[in-house]
Amino acid sequence: MVEKLSAAQARRIALAAQGFGKPVGTVGTRQLNLALQRLAVLQIDSVNVFERSHYLPLFARLGAYDKALLDKLTLARRAPYVEYWAHQAAFIPVESWPLWQWHRENELAGTGKTKHWDRTDTRMTDFLLTELAEKGPLPASKIEYEANKRSGPWWGWSEVKSALETMFFDGRVVVAGRKNFERYYDLPERRLPGHLLDASIPKAIAVRELVRQASTALGIATVRDLADYWRLFQADTKTAILELVESGELVPVRVEGWSSPGYLHRDARMPRRVDAMALLSPFDPVVWERARTERMFGFHYRIEIYTPGPQRQFGYYTLPVLQDEALVARVDLKSDRQNRTLRVQSAWREPGQAPDVARIAQLLRETAAWQGMESLVVQDWGDLAREVAGELGSTLVERDRKLPHADRDEPLART
């Protein structure tokens, strides 16, 4: 008989699997590494209006930490994490590199999902491999090539950048770190252990391990949820799920309000309650799959960075607020680094929820301190803005009527 779970039980399982609700003391490298191992992936994004997205999931789960420690884990020469296109551009454990060999082979054969550049231009690729061998690691901007052209608008990729990205996808080059968020490329053998480069794992086994990692990180999930965690094909995911059910690692369940079957990881915890207070990045695994977010929390969420200013409903970079087991509010944040001020561009309560304004205000204070900001300013936009400003004892500034829904409208730099 298939076990049935309530929606509240499913939420607690999911949040516990994601690392919420556990007491945290001083946060050092060990705590960061444990949290990263649990998630198995840390999505990267170029938007920096508040903070780079990959720093935020660990702040949400652990509280304030030294970002230099995370940089060392992800960007150092022999870092235990490496950047690859897993879900999206993301940091993954170095040990997971062989799990994506099938993906790199598909890309090299031209049967993958990405179409950055013409792989038949061997003159360009040979030149780039020689340049990296002699001078690497290098960013695309430091490589001179006679036929280098920029396509599209000024922020578009050059031919060199497009070629390097294609070679990054198919494994001929790796990302050797970033400076000012610009990727530096190098040869794989200079950055990754030989035994990982030489490892050969059949696709079916690799996909099964990726689905296992996703199920551990999500706790409870549908086929679509598990496939989305790594952007796998659902057919491959279903095959892996059947094998994991047969081995007893996944348990089929029915969840109140879910139209699709759920799968519970056998080691998933179901705490009696989850105590949490966190700002969630738009690229946090709790909310990155918008259909799951709506199903789990009844929270309709869309990031509005590409929405023209006058059409934005909540703000440019709105972050969901997790209060215990519910998403109760959303705030649009901007770090005014020049004036060392964290600007709350808007604040909204979620219909049907009861946000604790005192706790939200304290969370914003902690966020500002973590960001090195000395003051907080709240803009008068949103049905929670006035209460938040009052609790903070902060100035409530009038919303800019010239750009009523915007704080930045320039094109985003591609990573």
Image (cartoon, rainbow, N blue to C red):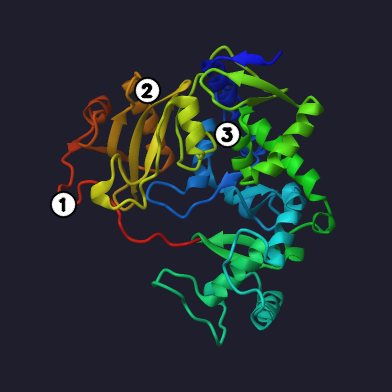
* Residue at the spot 30% in from the left edge and 57% down from the top edge: 409
Question: What is the spatial separation of the Cα atoms under label 3 and label 2, in whole angstroms?
Answer: 21 Å
Where, by quadrant of the figure, is residue 217 drawn? Answer: top right
Q: Residue at x 34, y 42 (%)?
A: 333
Circles 1 and 3: CB distance less than 8 Å? no
Is the residue marked by circle 1 packed among few (<14), some (14-19), or many (20+) residues within 10 Å? few
Q: Quadrant of residue 193?
A: bottom right
Q: Is residue 137 above or below residue 102?
A: below
- Are there few (<14), some (14-19), or many (20+) residues within 10 Å of tag 3? some
Say whether disc 3 or disc 2 marks the residue closer to the N-terminus.
Answer: 3
52 or 15: nearer the eye? Answer: 15
Inter-mark Cα distance, 1 to 3: 43 Å
Given the image, on which type of amino acid does mark 3 rest? Val
Q: Is residue 391 left or right of residue 58?
A: left
- Say which mark, if any, is on residue 48: none
Q: Is residue 76 left or right of residue 204?
A: left
Residue pointed to by mark 2:
359
User: Residue 66: image x %, image y %?
Assistant: 53, 42
Q: Name the residue that disc number 3 marks.
A: 27
User: Which residue is painted at 48% across and 32% down in the image?
Assistant: 293
Q: Residue 324: x and y, percent? A: 47, 20
Secondary structure beneath dot 1 equals: loop
Name the spot of residue 77 as percent of width and height, x first. Answer: 68, 58
Image disc number at residue 402: 1
* Relative side of 309 to 51, left or right: left
Of tags 3 and 2, the one toward the viewer is 2
SS assignment at label 2: helix
Looking at the rendered image, the disc whose residue lies closer to the viewer, 2 or 1, is 1
CA–CA distance in space, label 2 to label 1: 32 Å
* Residue 72 visible to an observer of this rendering: no
